[in-house]
Image (cartoon, coloured by chain):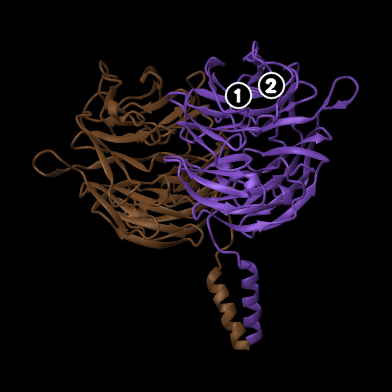
Chain colours: A purple, B brown
Amino acid sequence: MRLGLLAWMTAGLLACSNAPLRGTGDLGVVIQRASGSLQIIDSTQMKAIATVQGLGDLSHASLVYSRDGRYAYVFGRDGGLTKVDLLRGAIVQRVLQAGNSIGGAISQDGKLVAAQNYSPGGVRIFNAETLELVADIPAAYGEHGQFSKVVGLADAPGQRFVWSLFDAGEIWTAELSDPQHPRVEKFKNIGKQPYDGLITPDGRYYLAGLFGEDGMALLDLWRPEQGVRRILDGYGQGREKLPVYKMPHLRGWAVAGRYAYVPAIGAHEVLIIDTETWREAGRIAVAGQPVFVIARPDGRQVWVNFAFPDNAKVEVIDVETRRIVQQLEPGKAVLHMEFTPRGEAVWISARDDNRVLVVDTANFSQRAVLPAAAPSGIFFTSRATRIGF
Amino acid sequence: MRLGLLAWMTAGLLACSNAPLRGTGDLGVVIQRASGSLQIIDSTQMKAIATVQGLGDLSHASLVYSRDGRYAYVFGRDGGLTKVDLLRGAIVQRVLQAGNSIGGAISQDGKLVAAQNYSPGGVRIFNAETLELVADIPAAYGEHGQFSKVVGLADAPGQRFVWSLFDAGEIWTAELSDPQHPRVEKFKNIGKQPYDGLITPDGRYYLAGLFGEDGMALLDLWRPEQGVRRILDGYGQGREKLPVYKMPHLRGWAVAGRYAYVPAIGAHEVLIIDTETWREAGRIAVAGQPVFVIARPDGRQVWVNFAFPDNAKVEVIDVETRRIVQQLEPGKAVLHMEFTPRGEAVWISARDDNRVLVVDTANFSQRAVLPAAAPSGIFFTSRATRIGF
């Protein structure tokens, strides 16, 4: 009898495993790139609740979330795809899916995780539950069986993914309502060396930045039959070319109201694009070569960080006046910024200061400082509810 | 020794209380108005996971979520404010905060819950953790000490709330960074009988619908010093007035790209407003008097339900062509529709059929049917991450 009770209680305890019952809506992850680990953070208490080790090479790592907000799918540079349980603070599953990978996306219904790979060049699609390979879409191009590096992978409505082929100068879309049989559409000759892409917050427009040409490529996913259009052609003409210290990240491109704010490559400028005409609507001089240009969730401010040697600075643009209203120096080597879902705070990683700062976006005061080992990307679970994150 | 072990295990079990560990990002609530109860639903499995009783009068009930997605704050018609734990499927706290209440909102930082009351007319603000009263803002107006019914309460960036006074024809804003001392600003003579309000998804514009006049009132929260402006003045002129069977809900107003889609009062029409000029940009004839007009999260479709006698129908507008592309008859007395966060499905309550339907928004097929007792409002936890929900 007493043994029966003990067995029952043991089963109960194993089922609950000591992880506390809690909501996942205010959780997030900070990548600690140097140590292949990550911190799980609570944006309400403004503190770390767990550290998870053993994620491999996390330089340039990014992640997406399961639709319940419990699991992070972390894409490592070494081709590792790791599923992490935020509630237990533990790795659930890890596969080495490629030799060199650069990020990924999760499908609209949350059932498929896609990884974009440099080598072998292509996109691999996995069951989000088990991480079993569901589909493999090599980025073959040309007549000699080459494979292109894949960049700029994004999810789109209608159970689609969109990505760019760096070496081939192509944009591909794939519809995966039947995951075993992806329906792939290819857009060729979109421009030289697309280096990253983004999708607008409504999931309608896909833009690829071009490194090999002066301009960008635009695909209207509501009207794919119209093909890819060149925009901002020659936007850098007549300007002295500077060495590019770090490629800007396009996924962070900011759309605030009708205008998109994008980093100019190799210039100390943020470009403003009118998303109705897709023409340049202005430029804002900033303190360095912009890396991330991100809108506060209400679109009233745009925050910018910079490449070396200006990577200790952060500037805040007021969207209405298009002026810099604040310059911060939050720490050495600012790598990333992430807003809380409704924008009252922004979390900033300062890699070389080994800390993460929480800054109030209304008055720019510092609300918290968290120790972190060489922190890079910061990602909140609210990304699970957004298109293109 | 054995007793010590037993005590330890008992403590462990109490701490975990048998509720399963799970993410909250795909949870939601269906209000069962006739029985004062609610169902907690899982939008991934498409099933109910718990029923919670004892919430009082839930006719016209609505709710908001804590920033971690674990708790729902349910506003009942009887003035009851009930905090429900979605993970345990249980009521945590319940206060009768007014005699007659019509909904509420949660502050940007998640720390304050505001209830809008008909009697006593005003707004009461509670600590989201404890439900203790933090501030009471009676809707006093005129020279004789009257109190107005409060409608159209919404959260806004900058730790603000905005609401309308039905009897007074006023819009008030309150800034609550010091919750004990709300900074209230009043806008008078905004028009007769504002009956509901909404805030645009970016939190910039507050619009109040007017029942006593032909038009709407618009407040630019970035430029409050410019005061309230009348828009769509006389939009119903020259049209035969129909009896209004049910007041439309404005919180569901759809903003898709540059255009807002709003229900016309007492007419079989959806109005299109250009949010750059705030002028009418078109009208779409629909099957009845619209109640909810809601955009799919990607803004490509707008879904409409109707007042009696057309409340068995739902129509889908294609935003690009502005045409009805689908008419559904999902059941008797369709009261509400809620999209999953990334829009692949919509959940529809059919009160008089005692069921909730899950419909695929790509092909309009029925993906699931859930039994529910006289269901009305459906609310997913992703609302916690949005402005104005």
Whether residue B385 is visible to the viewer of this picture, yes or no, is: yes
Q: Residues within 10 Å of mark 1 (few under 14, many from 20)?
A: some
From the top left corner, tell me how far across and down residue B343 is, in percent. 55, 36
Residue A308's disc number: none
Read off the chain for label 1: A
The residue positioned 61% from the left and 34% from the top of the image is A388
The residue positioned 70% from the left and 38% from the top of the image is A104
Residue where numbered disc 2 is placed: A242
Gap between marks 1 and 2, in whole Å?
9 Å
Q: Left of A209 or right of it: where is A341?
A: left
Q: Which residue type carries mark 1?
A: His
Q: Which residue type carries mark 2?
A: Leu
Residue lying furthest right: A144
From the top left corner, tell me how far across and down residue A62 is, in percent. 68, 42
Q: Earlier in the sequence, mark 1 or mark 2?
A: 2
Q: Which type of secondary structure does the marked residue at label 2 adopt?
A: loop
Residue lying furthest left: B144
Which of the image's four quarters has the N terminus of chain B? Answer: bottom right
Residue where numbered disc 1 is placed: A268
